[in-house]
Amino acid sequence: MWDLVRSRGCRLFKLDSDGNIESVLPAMIDGGVNLPYPMEPAAGMDIVKTRAQYGTQLAFIGGIDKHVIRGSKEEISRELEYKIPPMVRTGGCVFGARPPHPQRHAYCELSFLCAEGVGDPGSRRREIGRGLAGAIRPGAML
């Protein structure tokens, strides 16, 4: 089945798991699955460490800690500064948190940080803002 859909142009094969799947990632890759979702930080998943270990063998959806994005601008900024720059450099990541909209406050804080980052072209915040701008546009792929 995998070979058939791959021969028709499908390149991404998704597995939805809210748990920690570190121990089964090698078997997933061997089996053809290359898009773990949501890369749940609350379960101990870390997209930056996983990307460092597996390179571009995997693409990602998720990876943003839903508990952190309900926090302060500083907490959100720390989360984004850690995750967005390395993932934007290597591509293949659609950032998100599960559930998609934990709080209206979080979306407002994320939007503020995005605008702040995009508006400051000389700083590292610009890279974070560009990544975040893609993350909050539905269907955007970084």
Image: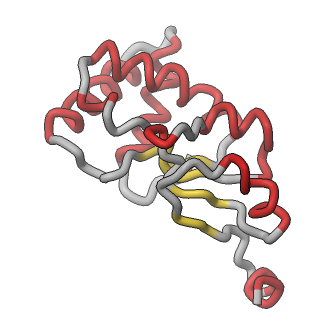
From this view, report whether residue 83 is shown above or below residue 12.
Answer: above
**Residue 71 image-quadrant placement:** top left
**120, 135: nearer the viewer:** 135
**141, 46: nearer the viewer:** 46
From this view, report whether residue 58 is shown above or below residue 50.
Answer: below
Image quarter of the N terminus = bottom right
**Residue 10 image-quadrant placement:** bottom right
From this view, report whether residue 82 is shown above or below residue 48.
Answer: above
- Specify the farthest residue to the top: 122
> Where residue 53 appears, x then y in whole percent?
79, 37
Q: Residue at x 81, y 55 (%)?
A: 26
> Where residue 131 appears, x then y in whole percent?
49, 35
Q: Residue at x 27, y 17 (%)?
A: 73
In the image: residue 90, left or right of residue 134: right
In the image: residue 74, left or right of residue 134: left
Q: Residue at x 68, y 32 (%)?
A: 49
How many marks can you see? 0
Q: Residue at x 48, y 48 (%)?
A: 62
In the image: residue 27, left or right of residue 112: right
